[in-house]
Amino acid sequence: MPEGDSVYRLARRLEGASVDRTIVSGELRSGAHAGAKLDGRRILSYDTHGKHLFTRFDDGWSLHTHLKMQGSWSVTRRPLPRAELHRVRCRFALDDGATLWGVDVPVMEYAPTADEQRVRERLGPDPLRRDWDAAEAVRRLRRRPDRPTVAALLDQGNLAGLGNLWVNELAFLRGIHPFAPIGATDITAIVGLAARCLLLSATVPGMYQVTTGNRSRGSTHWVVGRAGRPCLRCGTTIHVAAEVPDDPGRRRTWWCPRCQPETGVSDTMRTT
């Protein structure tokens, strides 16, 4: 699943390819406005909030998209392969010959730009936005102190932009067992680290989702994807759980049992 840094980078790429360009031929192919033509509209800007992308047009409307697990955006100067066309959810052919393709995008909402606030209201602060409010993120995370750390950090209503990769890596970097209650951790410290990591990943060339500082193959992450392999720090075998307690997405969780001891973890959450 794309995380906040992924969507931020995507927005910058789409900006360079399409801002101030006019859609010569374009339409939406899914959502409540499926079939709507966007011919003649000029793309003004892109904005992000966590994992949500907003494409703004010069008629006062926006397209809100969320990629979830499978969606993607492509920019081409040639048609997509015929076998891929059935997966296209929107198409914008621009006046410079480029075409934007929204492929398998599961969330596509076309509405007045002013309605973007309805989406933002349910999201927590985003470290990649100018209005980032670390204190507010800390306050929201403290509302349910018994919640498992990874589940609390995955909740976009607390802090927007962290996905499964980042919450697992942050827990390792802070020496926190992923299922330890968030209230037993230094919430201010983990929020500060999350903000620094996302900003580094989103803006520094070559550092996209590199959490170890080592870009060598197989060494970019401390725990994610390393189940059964030795910890890069202490050599202990990395554990994995197939499901995250209190997470509707039931995502995997990785940790090092030595670097992230089970202090404060209830028996119902212990698993290998």
Image (cartoon, rainbow, N blue to C red):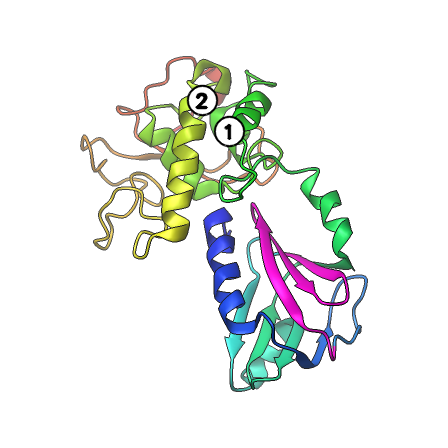
Which of the two residues, 230 or 103, is positioned nearer the viewer here?
103
Mark pair 1, 2: CA separation: 8 Å
Give the extent of the magenta segment. 39-65
Q: Give the residue type at disc 1.
A: Ala
> Residue 133, relative to residue 31: is it above or below?
above
Q: Secondary structure at mark 1?
A: helix
Which marked residue is nearer to the observer: mark 1 or mark 2? 1
Residue labelled with disc 2:
188
Q: Is residue 179 in the magenta section?
A: no
| Residue sitting at x 55%, y 82% | 98
Frontmost residue, 272 versus 132: 132
| Residue contact at pointers 1 and 2, CB within 8 angstroms | yes
Q: Is residue 256 left or right of residue 81?
A: left
In-image side of 16 versus 95 (left or right): left
Residue drawn 48% across the image and 22% down it: 269
- Dot 2: few (<14), some (14–19), or many (≥20) neighbours within 10 Å? some
What's the residue at 51%, 73% (across, down)?
A: 17
Decide whether the magenta segment is chiefly helix, strand or loop. strand
Q: Quadrant of residue 245?
A: top right
Q: Nearer the viewer, residue 253 or 65?
A: 65
Spot occupied by residue 272 in the image (x, y as percentages of width and height): 38, 29
Query: Amino acid type of disc 2?
Result: Thr
Q: Is residue 205 visible?
A: yes
**To which residue does mark 1 refer?**
134
